[in-house]
Image (tube, grey):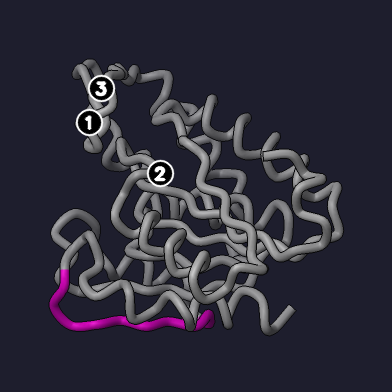
Amino acid sequence: MHTQTLKGRPLLIYLHGFLSSPQSFKCQLMRERLAVDFPHITFCAPQISPYPDVARESLNSLLEGFLQSPSPIGLVGSSMGGFWCTYLGERYNLPAVLINPAVRPSRFMPAYVGRVLQPYSGEAQEYRLSEADVDTMERVEAELPSSLNGRYWLLAQRGDETLDYRDAESLYQGQRQTLEEGGDHSFQGFARYCDPIVEFLFNQQ
């Protein structure tokens, strides 16, 4: 997407989770809702590499390109995408909505080191993480300030079977939080929040 296609229009960037893709259910739901109810908002969902150095470089490049336009930008991220939203939110002072976000990805990455990994969405691609990737992620995590300065909305379900919601509850203390009983890592009933997400990201800027 070229920055000149924005022409002052708001831009919503959706960041998918680890080994997921822009074809994920929540991403497509958000895309469809914008197309129907908020056609003035441009939607962008980049493919994010599971390799942290590649992801960081590509996301920084993406944002720096978009920031050349005067358009308001809001971020939405699920799981690992929630971590990257926080990283970008702090670096570029952008609002973000975080859905069952990963807080310290370096904690779960060692379980994937050395394994052949394939995207959950079925793309014909393989990845293999190394210890160096874990070290890189630790360095990226260290770039975040001890006290977050951005504007965030945490959406988390206590039934998340993959990540402990209490980690996110602690990190985003003082930020807007919606913690629901039950649910799971996919965040059941996400459609309820599409319109409030748009309001949070763009009506307060």
Direction from residue 102 to residue 45 in the image, left or right = right
- Disc ID at residue 105: none
* Upstream in sequence: badge 1 or badge 3: 3
Front residue of this view, candidates 182 and 9: 9
Q: x%, y% of residue 109?
A: 30, 34
Q: Nearer the viewer, mark 1 or mark 3?
A: 1
Front residue of this view, candidates 117 and 5: 5
Q: Residue at x 46, y 35 (%)?
A: 48
Q: Quadrant of residue 148?
A: bottom right
Quarter holding the C terminus is: bottom right
Q: Is residue 78 above or below residue 135?
A: below
Is residue 182 highlighted in magenta? Answer: yes
Q: Residue at x 64, y 65 (%)?
A: 41
User: Dot 1 surroundings within 10 Å: few (below 14), some, or many (20 or more)?
Assistant: few
Q: Residue at x 27, y 68 (%)?
A: 165
Is residue 73 highlighted in magenta? Answer: no
Quarter holding the N terminus is: top right
Name which residue type carries label 2: Pro
Direction from residue 30 to residue 20 in the image, left or right = left
Disc 2 designates what residue? 22
Q: What segment is highlighted magenta in the picture?
A: 174-183
Q: Is residue 13 above or below residue 202?
A: above
Disc 1 designates what residue? 122
Disc 3 designates what residue? 113
Q: Is residue 119 above or below residue 69?
A: above
